[in-house]
Structures are given as structure tokens and as C-alpha cells.
Image: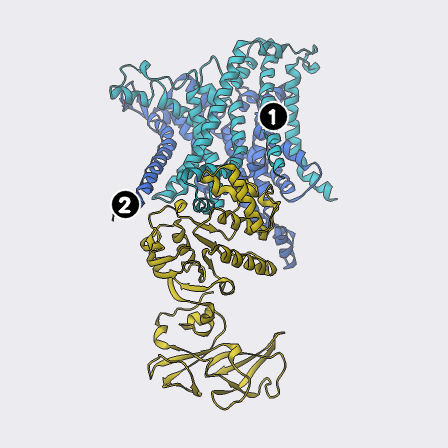
Chain colours: A yellow, B blue, C cyan
Amino acid sequence: MTSVTLRNLQKTYDNATEPAVKDLNLEIKAGELVALLGPSGCGKTTTLKMVAGLHDVTEGEVLFNGVAVNNIKPEKREVVMVYQNYLLFPYMNVEDNIGFGLRMRKVPKAEIADRVGKMLKLVQLEGFEKRKPSQLSGGQKQRIALARALIIRPKILLLDEPLSNLDAHLRDEMREMILNIHREFGLTTIFVTHDQEEAVLLADRIALMFDGVLQQYSPPKEFYEKPRTKRIASFFGNHNRLYGVLQGTVVHTAIGDFATEQVGIPDGSKVCLVIRPQSVLLEHSGANCIKAVINRIIYMGTYIRYRITVDGNEWDIMGDPHPLAGYEEGKEACFTLPKDKIWLIPETLETQETPERI
Amino acid sequence: MSEIQKQQAPRKQVNIIRNIVLLGIVLGVLLPMLPQLIWSITHRWYFPDLIPSEWSARSWEYIVNPNTRVIRAFLNSLVIASAVTVIGIVIGVPAGKALGMYKFKLKWLVELIILAPAIVPSLAATMGIQVIFIRIGLADTMLGVILVHLIPTLPYMIVTLSGVFANYDPEFEEQARSLGANRAKTFFLITLPAVFPGIVTGSMFAFLISWGQYILTILVGGGRIITLPILLFSFTGSGDNSIASALSIVFVLPAIIILIVTSKFLSGKSSGMGGFGSI
Amino acid sequence: MKKFSILIMLAPALAVIILLFLGGLLLGLLQSVNYMPIIGLNDFSLNAYASIFSDSQFLGSLALTLGISIVTTLLTIVFSIVTALALRQTFLGKRLVNFLYQFPITIPHLVIAIGIMLLYSQSGFFSRIATNLGFISTQSEFPILVYDDLGIGIVLVYLWKQIPFVGLIVLSILQSSGNDFEELAHSLGANKWQTFRHVLLPLIIPGILPASIICFAFVFGSYEVPFLLGKPYPAVLSVLAYRLYEDTDLSARPEAMAIAVFIAVFVSILVLVYKKVIKNVSGRAD
């Protein structure tokens, strides 16, 4: 069981002016499954390759169990990477692919054969020994790539977009397999992805990065309920926004006052109130209520989307798939914001926000 | 600090090896092209002098002198290589299209026949056909030389073009037609621009192969059709290094012009290069 | 209709190659067996073949030609990989070096043959440098690198032309596979050498084999460079064939034809064997 610590990690490529990764600090517990999430070019893959030792570190340290490994070559780190496009060596059959790492370590042939057999059993592809990569489906290739990585008993497993090349039904299957293997081996696992859904499906904790900077590091749920900035909120999907000033436990806005349960923000702060589309209730409960004209009603099959304009901001609200009396296009209706679902982002934290590019 | 040094030590070693290789490339490519530059303006250059003892423009005067055979040979070479290239395009475009875009019976055999002259040396075929050329009066003529030059050039032209056509999506043409372009417009606005790089690469191959041809020219031209390579051979054989050097500079000019003009088409991924994966 | 139009598209190219190339080969073959009534050869015989294969001059030429072709091809493969590996990295002046590297592809063999002669012959530039530095006192002490027994000058010219030709193919293979395979091998525990041996080499070799065969065939059959830079005896096969062809004694013609046909047949067999081997290797994989 190996913990990973990234301390003030920085990477600047040879011909680049801006660092690809800036002063990154991250603590990954032994046996944890962590996602590095972010849009392409955010530095997540660079970070992963620094952990693997495939990219040199410009500044800072990578520590395994508290010991710096900056100077350990990738082939000695016992960290293994599984690539998004699997990268099975095309001229080797399945057996030779899986046994590659052991052959590099000059493990006796009989032992290699034995361990390859066990691995094939683990990934449920017994009997595929002699197949060539070109004769495998995407899901099978993925499993062979995983077996090839696991056979060398790595301390840390690195996965590059593990689910994104797979169809919807294979995604579930692969997710199960990765979670099972992770549980069985207790392997510290880090994966990168640009797809927040993939991160949420797999990870214990997500480290979200924008432009080489770590934005938030927390369990998936908190990204939805407690995003630290508006940019994080938008990355995780639709959020409705309303601006105001916090006084005690009440946000004063241009269209009324809203009670909140959030603590820790100084009195008198300018805040952005955010709430998720599915948290807004289609009812008139008196307090925390918005009256607005419904611009548009869109039937989505499993739910209905209502579009309203609140203090100049476009809002989306998700309601039951059954039409409700009084909630009709062009008519004014009431929407309630439950005070435990309201999340406030202090405006001071927004200084570094740049337009989202996803 | 010591950690950083340790980490960079192997990298430095690799850089040294790499730089030696790069230096080798630069010197290796340039060195065999430099002596001609010096020799061409040399009158006397005795052994073991490092610098010629007497300079002169004699060989260049010889080359531009209309009374020598040089200008004639240059024009002959130009006419032959241009004719070979044009005929190559006319024959090669349809053949390249057929091989690149369609599947048909015995395609493997057609490919084998068309590729064969690129691999199997043409000496036997040219020596063999010469008796017929003599009979029908093609021996010692420009037309005869142009015809035999087609043998080694056509495969390169066709392979290059079939590679381009293989990557060409005919639905672009359909799209253009459905948007209102007529046949001619479709050809000039859609088809031609798409295959143009292939035609350029193929033409370059064809021109240069013909331009550099000696043995086929001398076999069929019988010494009557004088081209630059034939002059070059005779001056090299006679040991006149100055004129041989000046001639070889003239001889290499089209290659350099073509290289500079078309270098954007000739990258590592050029279809012309890639096509030979299929022999 | 469609079949017909494909035939029309292919007809001119096929006509030229079948008539001139295959026809020429057939006529060469007929002349080599002394049977071509149209020019008065009526007595079929294999004498020409019998005589060349018992001729020590031919066998010497064959050995020399084979040696030059094999050495050139092997060195081309080695240096194309070495240079491509160096060119793949980023360094100052990369564009310039890349441009230089492509230069030889278009430059005619003849020009470089003359350049190599002026550089490496006993009165050449390197011999002058060696004399001036005091390594040798007369030009005859300079090692014979051109017009030599081993064809070193000839090999140098071919290497100059062919290394970039094959090297560009290696580069494109390396580019299309990216760094990922190597990184993966490292992370699976392969060191630099193992990565090269087990990952890069198996990716490169199948890709450059066809080009290497073309190089071999070209060297085996070409005339110009060995004529300029080779010794008269033994000469390579093509030079020997042309010399016999030009002989005033017309009775040498069938032997000339026999040698030329031998070159063509040898290369054809080589390519067919190569294709067969490739087919078997990939066939075993399925």
C-alpha cells in the first residue's frame, strides 16, 4: 500500500513560457482511487506522467510513502500506466503482451506463463492467449492492457481516460471491473479524465484542475453541492445563479431575500447564490420563493425543463415529467429554493475566473 | 543540486550522441556536394595543395559556349524529362485513380505488373527491346529515349497517385454536384485540388528519374542523343575534373529547384514515400 | 460498364509496361537462349548460361555485386534508424537539418559519385588533408577507397542516397506511433535498450522492409555508380553485361543478355520470396 504526495509540483516544458502544472499540492492516501479531472490542456496528464516518472519534474517533489522518488527512473518506480488507446503491442499476441513487463524483469518463463494465466482469469479472458490485438474488441483490449499493467504488481496504477473509449454498456462493465480490482488489490489508483461523469462514477476523490492549477480536491458529491467557484460549478453542469449580499443567514438580492444555512462567510460579503436545476421546487411555500414568467417548457422524457429569467440570469429548472397546473408557458409561476440546497460562493474568490472552455 | 545533476547526467550523454549523429548528417550530406563547387572554378589544383593554385572560369565559359554540346545536351535532357513527365501524368492519373479507388478482379496482378519496373532492373528489358527499336527506327531517336524512360518512371507516378486517390473521398464530388457545380467545375474545383499534391510529387519523381538516367539513354540513344548525364560521363572518364564539376552543378540545379519548390509536399508522411509499403 | 471503364483507365499504363518492359524482358530472354528468328538466331541453346556460370569473371562479378548490395542494404537500415532516432528529438536548427536530410532524395547519383570521387580518391580532398597533416607522404599511401576491390566508394554513394529515403519512412513510423509505446514500455519496467529492442525495432522493421528490398534491388541492378567508381575487373554484373553487349564480337550478345536476364530473375525471385515470407509470418499470426 503506497500513498502519493505531490509537493509544490511544477512542470514547465522546454519551449513553453507558462508552466503546464503550477505549484500542485495533492495528498493521495494509500489504496485511494483518485481522479485528476479537467478540460484538455489543464495539466492532468502531465501530472500523471510526472507520477509515473515519464516526465521530468521542473520543481517540487513526488513522494511515495513520504519518500521522494524524483530521481527514480520510470522502469524502477513500479508505477504503471494504462493508456486510453490501450497500446497493445500490435506484433505480439495477448500472452506476450501481458507477459511483457515480466520478460523485461527476466522472470523465468514458467512463472510468466503461470502468472499470465492468472491474469487472464482475473480479467475473464481465459483462452485468449494466442490472439493478436487486431482480433480483440475495444473492451477486450482494455482488459488486456489492464492485465499487462497488474501482472508486474505495481505499487500504483495510473489510468488514462479508462472509460471514455467504451460504449455505454461496456462502461458499466469496465467500471465494475476496475472497482473490483481496486478493492481486491488495494492498489492506489490515479486516473485522468476530461469527463466529469467518468470521474464521478469511479473516484473516491476528484482533483479538478484548470490551466495547471488545482481548483478543488474533494469527494464527487461536494463538486455538485459545494463548488468552490462559479467555474467549478459550470464544469459540473447547469447551475442557476443569483447575485446578492449576505447579512447573517439571509442573502439580500434584487428580487428578494433568501435564507441559507451556510456558515463561514463574513457578514456583508457579496455572494453568488447557486442552486442546481433539480433542487428548485415547483411550489409556493412562502419563504425563499421566486416569481417568474416561464419562457419555455421542454419535455425531456424523464423530466420537464422549465426556463425562466431571474434578475437577468437564465435559469433551468427540472421538474417531474407530468405537467403541473399553473406552470404553463408565458405565465407567471412560483419556484422555491430550499434553504439547505442553496450554496453561496463569495465573489472575492471569483477574481481568477476566466471564461469556461469545454 | 546534486539530485538535479544526477537526474540530468544520462540525458546529457544522450544529447552528446544525438549531436554527433546530427553533425554526421550535416557533414555527410554536404561534403560530397562541396568539391564540385571549388573544382568548377579551378584551372590547376596540384596534389597535395589544399587550395587550387590557379582559378579560372574556363569550365563555365565552356558550358555557356554555344559551340559546345552542353547547351544542346541540357535542352535534350529538359525535353526528354518534360515529355516523360507529361506522358506520365496523362497515363498515370487514370491508372492511379483506378488502382486507388476501385476494386476489381485480378487487381493484384495489375499492381504487380505496374510495380515490377520499379523493382526489377530495366537493363535486360531495354537491351532486349533494342533490336525491335532498331527495326522500327526508334533507335537513336528522342522518341525512343522518351519511351524507355517511361519504364522506370511510370511505377513511381502511378503508386504516388494511387496513394492519393485511395485517400480521396468521391463523395466530395457528389456534394459539389448536388450544390450546383457542373462536371467541369467539379473537376477543377474539387478533384484537381485534392489530387494536385500527388501529381506534383509524382511529376517530381518522374522528372528526376528521367533526368538522371544514363544507361537507358545510351542504350537506345546510341550516342546520338546527347543528354547531360552522357556528357558528364564522358568528362568524368576523361579526367577533366573542372568541367565535370561545372556540369554536375548544372545537372543538379533542377533537382534543387524542385526540392525547394515542392519541399512542402515531401514530408515524412508524403503519400509518395508511403506508397511503397505495398510491394 | 464499370469494368470496362476501369480497363480503359488502366490500358495505357499496362500497354506501356507490358509492351516495353515485359516485352523487352521476353526479347532479352529469347536472345539469351539464341532463339530469335527475326534477327537470324535460329538455334535454341543454353550455351550462354552454361558459359557465364562456368566463367570465373562472371562469378567474381556476382560475388562483388551481392556483397555491395547486402552491405549497402544492411548499413542503410542501421543508419536510417540511427539518424531517424536523432532527428525525431527537438533541437536547435531542426528545420534546417530536416531539410538537409531530404536533400539526397532528389540529387542524382551521378553528381554524388563525382563528389565522392573528388573527396575520397587517392588524389582527393581527404588524401590532401592527410598529406598536409603529415599522416602520409605520397598519395599512394592513402587507402584505396574509390576504384577499390571492395567497392567502398560505390557503397558510400548508395548510402548517401538511400539513408534519407529509408530514414524518412522510419521517421513517419516513429511519428505515427508517438512516444506512448516507449513510455508504456518504461512504465512496465523496460530500460532504454529493452525499449528499443522489444518495442521500437519491431515497430520499425516491418515498415522499412519493402523500402529495403527496393534499395537492394536497385543496387543489385544499377549501372552508373559502379561504372564510375568501380574497378574494371571485377566489375558489377550490370557493367559486365553492358560491356559484353557493346562488344564488337556479336557472339558475346547472348551472354550479355543472359547476365541481364539473370539480374532481373534474381531480383524477381528475391521479391517473391520476401512476399512469401511476409505472408507466412502474418499468416501464422491469424
In depth, the one of A104 and B82 nearer the eye is A104
- Residue drawn at x 50%, y 47% is A151
Q: CA distance from mark 1 to mark 2?
A: 56 Å
In depth, the one of B182 and B213 nearer the eye is B213
Which image quarter holds the N terminus of chain C? top right
Q: Amino acid at mark 1?
A: Ser
The chain letter under disc 2 is B
- Residue most toward the right? C1
The chain letter under disc 1 is C
- Are labels 1 and 2 assigned to the same chain? no
Q: Is residue A303 left or right of residue C76?
A: right
Q: Is residue A18 visible?
A: no
Q: Which mark is residue C268?
A: 1
- Residue drawn at x 55%, y 45% is B196
Q: Secondary structure at mark 1?
A: helix
Q: How many marks?
A: 2
Residue under pointer 2: B5
- Give the percent coordinates (x, y) of residue A262: 40, 80
Q: Amino acid at mark 2?
A: Gln
Quarter occupied by residue C148: top left
